[in-house]
Image (tube, rainbow, N blue to C red):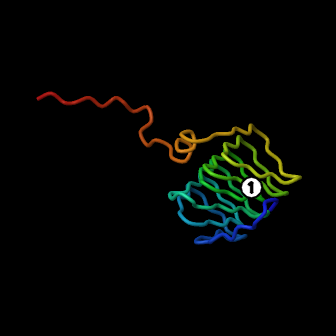
């Protein structure tokens, strides 16, 4: 919005205004949320984009490369590449970002944490078996 050129986003999936989803969402490409989601939202592909409209609500952790937020997120937001917080954006949680654009009126009730490089890759993908080092070779 404040930048020099406007991005046109490809929308592959849409959660409509009168739709409520319970459970985690994993997507690639573009996801647009006008409704409500109660669960974590994660992108599976680099360059993916999540847009949350002024009517949209996400209750859970968001872990995506790019996000344009004009609605509400209740949970931490991990933006691997870029986050744009529009005028009606509300985040109740921490925001981890590489690049941030924030319009007048946007609100973050939590910490803003900048990251780059290797930290970015760690934030984009949680290790599946983090801390699981209990496996030992069997002896025959």
For residue 32, side relative to residue 87 (left or right):
left
Vertical arrangement, residue 116 with respect to residue 83, above or below: above
Coordinates of residue 127 in the picture (x, y in percent): 46, 41
Q: Which residue in the rendered view is the most extreme toward the left?
A: 140
Q: Residue at x 74, y 37 (%)?
A: 111
Q: Quadrant of the C terminus?
A: top left
Is 82 situated above or below 34? above
Is residue 122 left or right of 8 when viewed as pictured?
left
Please tell me whether mark 1 sits on a helix, a strand or a loop: strand
- Point 51% across, 46% down: residue: 125
From what the image shows, is residue 86 above or below residue 9? above
Residue located beneath label 1 in the image = 84
* Rendered location of residue 106, percent (x, y): 84, 51
The quadrant in which the N terminus is found is bottom right
User: How many neighbours does mark 1 have within 10 angstroms: few (below 14), some (14-19), or many (20 or more)?
Assistant: many
Among the 4 quarters of the image, the one containing residue 123 = top right
């Amino acid at each position: 919005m404040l930048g020099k050129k406007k991005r046109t986003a490809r929308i592959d999936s849409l959660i409509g205004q009168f739709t409520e989803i319970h459970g985690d969402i994993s997507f690639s490409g573009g996801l647009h949320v006008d409704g409500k989601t109660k669960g974590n939202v994660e992108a599976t592909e680099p360059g993916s984009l999540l847009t949350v409209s002024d009517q949209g609500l996400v209750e859970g952790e968001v872990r995506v490369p790019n996000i344009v937020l004009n609605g509400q997120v209740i949970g931490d937001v991990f933006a691997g590449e870029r986050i744009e917080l529009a005028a009606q954006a509300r985040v109740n949680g921490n925001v981890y970002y590489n690049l941030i654009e924030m319009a007048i009126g946007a609100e973050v009730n939590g910490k803003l944490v900048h990251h780059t490089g290797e930290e970015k890759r760690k934030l984009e993908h949680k290790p599946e078996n983090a801390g699981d080092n209990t496996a030992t070779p069997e002896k025959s």
